[in-house]
Image: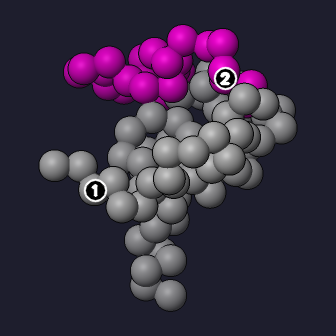
Amino acid sequence: MAATARLPKPVSEAWHWQLQAACRDVKASRFFHPENERGSARENRERRAKRICQDCPVMRQCRAHALKAREPYGVWGGLGERERRDLIASSRAA
């Protein structure tokens, strides 16, 4: 069962930043890997997704959400899955 306690409440004020996101009209497959995607294919997809995040006006909000909710998959706020796991682990250690 997914841990949903960390997610924002289901009201528009908690999610309004998503309306400004650079990825809003981009297919989710750009940010989330298909089953069994490995190696250079995964790295290339993730790099393309991160390029979209670079100029996003709400990248900080997106990243903060992903870290707070501990989003396990995809690229959020310019960070890949491993990068988020590492940041969460280092903040726990501190």
State whether residue 73 is above or below residue 60. Answer: above
x%, y% of residue 36? 23, 21
Q: Start and end of the magenta stretch?
A: 21-45
Label ID, residue 84: none
Among the 4 quarters of the image, the one containing residue 86: bottom left
Q: Does residue 71 appear to the left or right of 48 in the view shown?
A: left
State whether residue 74 is above or below residue 93. Answer: above
Tags 1 and 2 touching, CB below 8 Å: no
Q: CA distance from mark 1 to mark 2?
A: 25 Å
Q: Earlier in the sequence, mark 1 or mark 2?
A: 1
- In the depicted view, which residue is nearer to us: 45 or 59? 59
| Residue highlighted by disc 1 | 3
x%, y% of residue 82? 42, 50
- In the depicted view, which residue is nearer to us: 59 or 36? 59
Q: Residue furthest bottom?
A: 94
- In the depicted view, which residue is nearer to us: 48 or 72? 72
* Residue drawn at the location 43% of the way across and 80% of the way down: 92
Among the 4 quarters of the image, the one containing residue 55: top right
Q: Secondary structure at mark 2?
A: loop
Residue 54 seen anywhere in this rendered image of the structure? no
x%, y% of residue 56? 79, 34
Label ID, residue 23: 2
